[in-house]
Image (cartoon, rainbow, N blue to C red):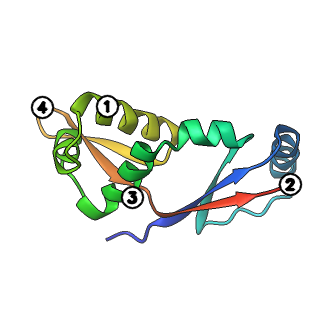
Amino acid sequence: AMKLKKVKIIIEPVAQTSNRWLAAMKGKAKANHKEEIITVSSWEILGKIMSPPRLQILTMIPILMPESINALAKSLKKDFKNVYSDVKFLADLGLIELKEQGRRKKLVPIAKFDGIEFALTA
């Protein structure tokens, strides 16, 4: 299995985020290939993004390695529609990958990370 990276979710004021991006664009920020960073500007936003069902999906994908979103929903004993929309959302955020497989092009949720770290910057 491919060694998965960690993802770090940083809660920081928007102003700091833009400073960090500016530094990165000027080439000052060192890229860390062991982790990827997602920045959110407040706890409220983080709470919306990382609802308990989404966190559960995120933690269970690397363990269950489901062959479809349907299989994932069944394993979690959850409604397909809810799991589908959460999986799509997490994929849009870049936290998981969705691969089309087979003739019927079913979507397979694939883990991109094996850990989440939450960091606070004041």
Residue 25, how many percent across, how many down? Answer: 81, 46
Type of the residue with mark 2:
Ala
Q: In the drawing, does residue 23 fall left or right of residue 107?
A: right
The answer for how far apart the CA atoms under marks 3 and 2 are is 27 Å
Say few, some or many: other residues with alpha carbon within 10 Å of mark 2 (under 14 / 14 to 19 / 20 or more).
Answer: few
Type of the residue with mark 4:
Arg
- Residue 59 tag number: 3
Q: In the drawing, does residue 26 fall left or right of residue 115?
A: right
Looking at marks 3 and 2 on the same chain, the residue that comes earlier in the sequence is marked by 3
The answer for how far apart the CA atoms under marks 3 and 4 are is 27 Å
State which quadrant residue 82 falls in.
top left
- The residue that label 1 is drawn on is 82
The answer for how far apart the CA atoms under marks 2 and 4 are is 48 Å
Say few, some or many: other residues with alpha carbon within 10 Å of mark 3 (under 14 / 14 to 19 / 20 or more).
Answer: some
Q: Secondary structure at mark 1?
A: helix
Looking at marks 4 and 1 on the same chain, the residue that comes earlier in the sequence is marked by 1
Give above or below for 44 relative to 28: above
Residue at horizontal 55 percent and vertical 39 percent from the top: 49
Residue at horizontal 88 percent and vertical 45 percent from the top: 19
Q: Secondary structure at mark 4?
A: loop
Looking at marks 1 and 3 on the same chain, the residue that comes earlier in the sequence is marked by 3
- The residue that label 4 is drawn on is 104
- The residue that label 2 is drawn on is 122
The answer for how far apart the CA atoms under marks 4 and 1 are is 21 Å
The answer for how far apart the CA atoms under marks 1 and 2 are is 34 Å
Give above or below for 121 relative to 73: below
Give above or below for 83 relative to 3: above
